[in-house]
Amino acid sequence: MIKMTKIYLYLLVPIMFFIEGCSENEPPVKDRWYTPLQISNGASVFKKHCASCHGDEAQGLISDWRQPLSDGSYPPPPLNGNAHAWHHPLSVLKRTIQNGGIPLGGKMPPFNDKLNDEEIKSSIVFFQNKWNDKIYNAWIERGGLK
Ligand code: HEC
């Protein structure tokens, strides 16, 4: 009898952990809309597809992102809350990443053929997670979740 219980436990506990790890219902980060899993997925998407222009930590690689280049386009801005990415709601951020900036005279390439919806969302989570609470809350108040 004791032996059976032990076997059940050996089987059940890893299965429970597995299910929990896969859960779509992971609780969000405190006072934010996203989950820890989206942050870690976003870190790898960002590193692979975005960091070369926006910096490893989304800090930007150019000292003055407000200064247009000689061709009139703008350099890649920081996305970590220091520039104005936080003026845009989620839907606009998503569209920017899907379509890139070329249709608007910018230089950012489109990602709709490289990244799926969830990957695009997690890349946003990665840089939003660098925003301090003041910036994040201002974004929410402006209707950021739209
Ligand atoms: C080849 C360089 C390059 C890459 C790679 C790149 N970007 Fe950009 N990004 C830019 C530039 C340049 C701009 C400014 C607008 C423009 O020129 O299109 C920009 C603008 C943005 C904006 C708008 C910011 C604002 O303040 O309005 C967001 C959001 C953004 N990028 C996110 C990303 C994400 C996420 C990735 C990776 C999936 C990425 N970018 C990859 C160059 C790049």
Image (tube, grey):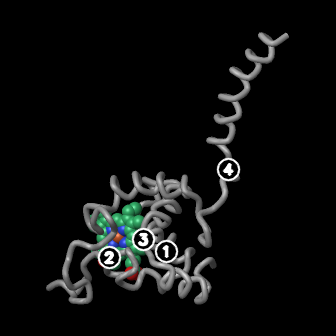
x then y, percent, for residue 80? 38, 74
x then y, percent, for residue 134? 50, 85
Mark 2 or 3: the one toward you: 3
Query: Dot 2: what SS?
Result: loop
Using a 10 Å C-alpha cutoff, classify the residue at mark 2 as few (fewer than 14 neighbours), some (14 to 19) or many (20 or more): many
| Residue 84, above or below 27 | below
Mark 4 or 3: the one toward you: 3
Mark 4 to mark 2: distance in Å?
Answer: 30 Å
Residue 24, numbered label: 4
The mark nearer the N terminus, 4 or 2, is: 4
- Circle 3 is placed at which residue position? 130
Q: Which amino acid, by three-letter code, is at mark 3?
A: Lys
Using a 10 Å C-alpha cutoff, classify the residue at mark 4 as few (fewer than 14 neighbours), some (14 to 19) or many (20 or more): few
Mark 4 to mark 3: distance in Å?
Answer: 23 Å
- Circle 1 is placed at which residue position? 93
| Residue displayed at 48% across by 52% down | 41
Q: Which amino acid, by three-letter code, is at mark 2?
A: Pro
The mark nearer the N terminus, 4 or 1, is: 4
| Residue displayed at 34% across by 55% down | 47
Mark 4 to mark 1: distance in Å?
Answer: 23 Å
| Residue displayed at 26% across by 89% down | 66
- Circle 2 is placed at which residue position? 78
